[in-house]
Image (cartoon, rainbow, N blue to C red):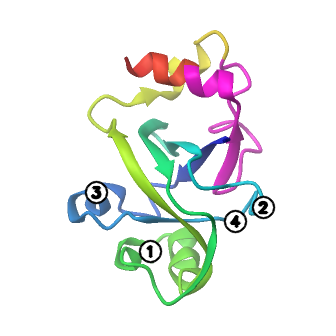
C-alpha cells in the first residue's frame, strides 16, 4: 500500500459542489500510473490562496482507462485554462475510483500547519515544482497528517 497527494486546483474545479452533489467518485491519474493501486491512502490538497489538505480518501479501484465523461465533468471551470483543459481531457483517460473518508473542508490542515509540522518538511504539495495531479506521500508523512486530524 502506498499513499498519495491528489491535487485540486480550486479555480479549475468546483470541489465543494462535487461533494454536495456526491459526484466526486473518480480522480484522473496523470503521474505514477503504474504505482497507484486499490487501497492506497490519499490526501486531497487544494492549491491556491487557501492551500491545504481538505480531505482524506482511499483509492478503491486500480487505474482504469475510461471512455466518456465522468459524472463531475460539468464542474470543471472552463474560464480557467487548467479547468478547460481538464474538462476536455476528461472525455477519455486513466482514472481511479476514490472514496472520501474524511471531509476536512470545515477544518482543513493549512499549508502553514504542514510547513511547521516536524516530519513534514518534505511534503511536496504547495512547493515550487510540485506540479501534477498525483504526488507520492511517504507512510511516515501520511501518519503524521492523520495525527493532525485526530
* 127 left or right, relative to 98: right
State if disc 4 and disc 1 touch (CB < 8 Å): no
Q: Which residue is mark 4?
A: 30
Above or below 144: residue 88: below
* Nearer to the camera, 53 or 85: 53
Is label 4 or label 2 in front? 2
* 17 left or right, relative to 36: left
Q: Which residue is mark 2?
A: 34
The numbered dot on residue 19 is 3
Residue 78 position in % (x across, y down): 45, 77
Residue 6 position in % (x across, y down): 57, 50
* Residue depicted at 22% across the width and 65% down the height: 21
Disc 3 to disc 1, C-alpha distance: 21 Å
Check disc 1 and report its element: helix, strand or loop: loop
The segment highlighted magenta reads 120-143
Above or below 68: residue 110: above
Residue 140 lies in the magenta-colored region: yes
Residue 47 lies in the magenta-colored region: no
N-terminal of the pair, mark 4 or mark 3, is 3
Q: Does the rendering let one see residue 72? A: yes
Amino acid at each position: 500500500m502506498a499513499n498519495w497527494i491528489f491535487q485540486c486546483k480550486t479555480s479549475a474545479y468546483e470541489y465543494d459542489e462535487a461533494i454536495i452533489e456526491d459526484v466526486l467518485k473518480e480522480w484522473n491519474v496523470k503521474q505514477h500510473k503504474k504505482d497507484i493501486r486499490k487501497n492506497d491512502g490519499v490526501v486531497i490538497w487544494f492549491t491556491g490562496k487557501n492551500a491545504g489538505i481538505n480531505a482524506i480518501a482511499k483509492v478503491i479501484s486500480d487505474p482504469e482507462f475510461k471512455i466518456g465523461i465522468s459524472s463531475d465533468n460539468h464542474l470543471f471551470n472552463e474560464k480557467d485554462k487548467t479547468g478547460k483543459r481538464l474538462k476536455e481531457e476528461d472525455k477519455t483517460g486513466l482514472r481511479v475510483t476514490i472514496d472520501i473518508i474524511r471531509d476536512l473542508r470545515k477544518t482543513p490542515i493549512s499549508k502553514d500547519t504542514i510547513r511547521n509540522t516536524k516530519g513534514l518538511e518534505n511534503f511536496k504539495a504547495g512547493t515550487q515544482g510540485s506540479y501534477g495531479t498525483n504526488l507520492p506521500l511517504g507512510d511516515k508523512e501520511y501518519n503524521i497528517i492523520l495525527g493532525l486530524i485526530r
